Image: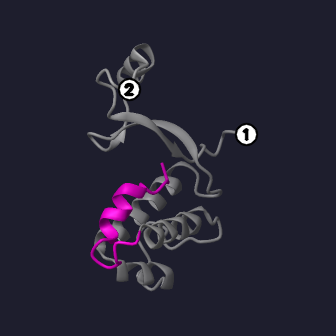
Amino acid sequence: MGELNPKAFAEACKQTLPEDDLDVALLCLKWQAEINTPAWHPFKVVIVDGQERLNELKEHGDAVYSLVVTALREMNEYNPSGRFLMPELWNYRENRKATLEEAIQFILVGDMDTGASHMIRKSRPEPAWHT
């Protein structure tokens, strides 16, 4: 949670950036760093439209903007006071956190090629109560 998907980010950037992988990678790294900055709070309950950094991001298209906003929302949901990532089992086919049953199946199967390839660890912020 709270981590940009580099492949989705690169795909979303195709409309506004040349096909230079370095430019896309640097832009993705820049926005991951912005997301991880605890002092940056571009939205509380709703997104603050006047936020300069988010407006700058809109230049790269709605898909890129949506990816960054989703990562920020995920981080804010789990730990709004400190932006750090924490691994979480994720079901990418359904774009959601894996259920307990899916997590157990993933652990027991243990092989990414035997049907559990749609679930990998994804980072998310630690909960506020975690020390």
Image coordinates for residue 91, horizontal then vertical, percent: 34, 36
Q: Position of residue 95 (x, y in %)?
A: 31, 44
Which circle marks residue 40 in the picture?
Answer: none
Where residue 70 appears, x then y in whole percent?
40, 59
Q: Quick check: marks 2 and 1 in contact, CB under 8 Å?
A: no
- Residue 118 inside the magenta-drawn segment: no
**Residue type highlighted by circle 1:** Thr
Task: Name the residue rendered at 40%, 23% in the picture.
Answer: 100
Q: Nearer the viewer, residue 97 or 23?
A: 23
Q: Residue furthest right?
A: 131
Residue at 40%, 72% (x, y): give it.
Answer: 20
Three-letter code, disc 2: Met
Provide the residue span drawn in magenta. 1-20
* Frontmost residue, 7 versus 71: 7
Q: Please name the predominant secondary structure of the magenta segment in the image.
A: loop
Report helix, strand or loop for mark 1.
Answer: loop
What is the number of the mark on residue 131? 1
Residue for point 40% across, 21% down: 111
**Left or right of 127 on screen, residue 21:** left
Label at residue 112: 2
